[in-house]
Amino acid sequence: MIDPVEFTGNCPKNVSKDAKYAVRSGHAGPVVGLVYRNANGEQWHPTTEAHPDLVEMVNHVKTRFGAAPNGPFYINEYAHVIVPAGEGARYYLAGSYEDPVEFEFEGNVLSGRGVDLDGRDFEPGDEWTGPHPGIPYVLKAGGGDVYYESTLRKDVTKKVWLSVHVGPDAAKAFAARIQGVKGWSGGRFYVNEWREIFAPVNDADGLRYVYVGHLEFDEPWFDNPHP
């Protein structure tokens, strides 16, 4: 287990409860859990005991920086485990975790893989019925670029643009994939640890989530902040 260091990449602040994982207290010890909202409006609270090493990684960071054990954490597209802890809820890298996090609940397998509850592969534009944990990015209004907001120090933030990392043409081409789902107004989308991309969309049916596609390793994207 590594000595945790402050995470220097995209820290997913201000996301809803269902957009993060959490370590919770279980019957026989701490477990990994999430919140899942199904198509009928039910809220499921599945947990799994299958990841004791992940639990230990998260709680090592929590206690190392003076917080109580358990609580929220994230896994990004580089398999980095990102844990908020300590004063001001700073974000720390707990290490990398490659094992797939999946949950069994009432006969369903819940995971961030690009398949629906029946195991059918999603196609771009399909409704995303998978769990919502992921790392938020933002499509610029009008398309053309993507960014995330980085906190440099107390009360100081900065937008980190994809075009700065990969060039304007490559960033515009990638942003077009998101714009095809989100529309020209832009807004937030998510990339999870399976490198699946999904986005919330407001339409006549209200807020729903739509599948965008898979983020390939050779696509233009933000650099790995902790290679």
Image (spheres, rainbow, N blue to C red):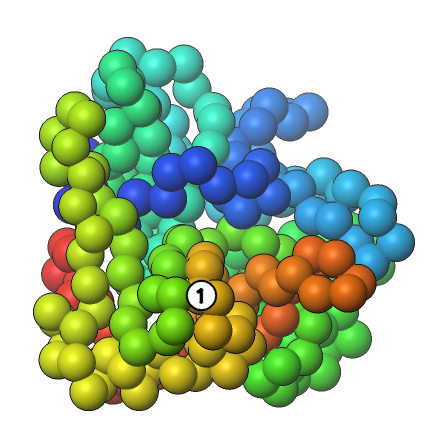
- Amino acid type assigned to the residue bearing label 1 in the image: Gly
Give the residue at x 15% y 32%: 156
Residue at image coords 41%, 14%: 68
Q: Nearer the viewer, residue 131 or 220?
A: 220
Residue 160, horizontal then vertical, whole percent: 19, 56
Q: Position of residue 143 (x, y in %)?
A: 37, 75
Q: Secondary structure at mark 1?
A: loop
Q: Determine the image quadrant of residue 14.
A: top left
Residue 224 picture quarter: bottom left
Please tell me which residue is depicted at 33% across the width and 30% down the height of the picture.
84
Q: Which residue is mark 1?
A: 186
97 over 91 or under it: above or below: below
Indicate left or right for 127 with 197 as reference: right
Is there any visible trace of residue 82 in the rendered image?
yes
* Residue at screen point 14% across, 55% down: 226
Question: Where in the figure is residue 129, as x and y percent of width and height?
Answer: 70, 65
Compared to residue 222, the image places residue 88 above or below, namely above
> Which corner quadrant holds the C terminus?
bottom left
The extreme right residue here reads 40
Which residue occupies the foreground of this view, 27 or 133?
133
Q: Is residue 194 visible?
A: no
**Up-down: is 222 above or below 75?**
below
Does residue 163 appear to the left or right of 191 in the view shown?
Answer: left
Name which quarter of the figure residue 94 lies in: top left
Q: Position of residue 29 (x, y in %)?
A: 57, 25
Of residues 41 and 84, which is closer to you in this image? 41
Query: Number of numbered discs present?
Result: 1
- The quadrant of the image that shows the N terminus is top left
Within 10 Å of the Cα at label 1, are there few (<14), some (14-19), or many (20+) other Cα atoms?
many
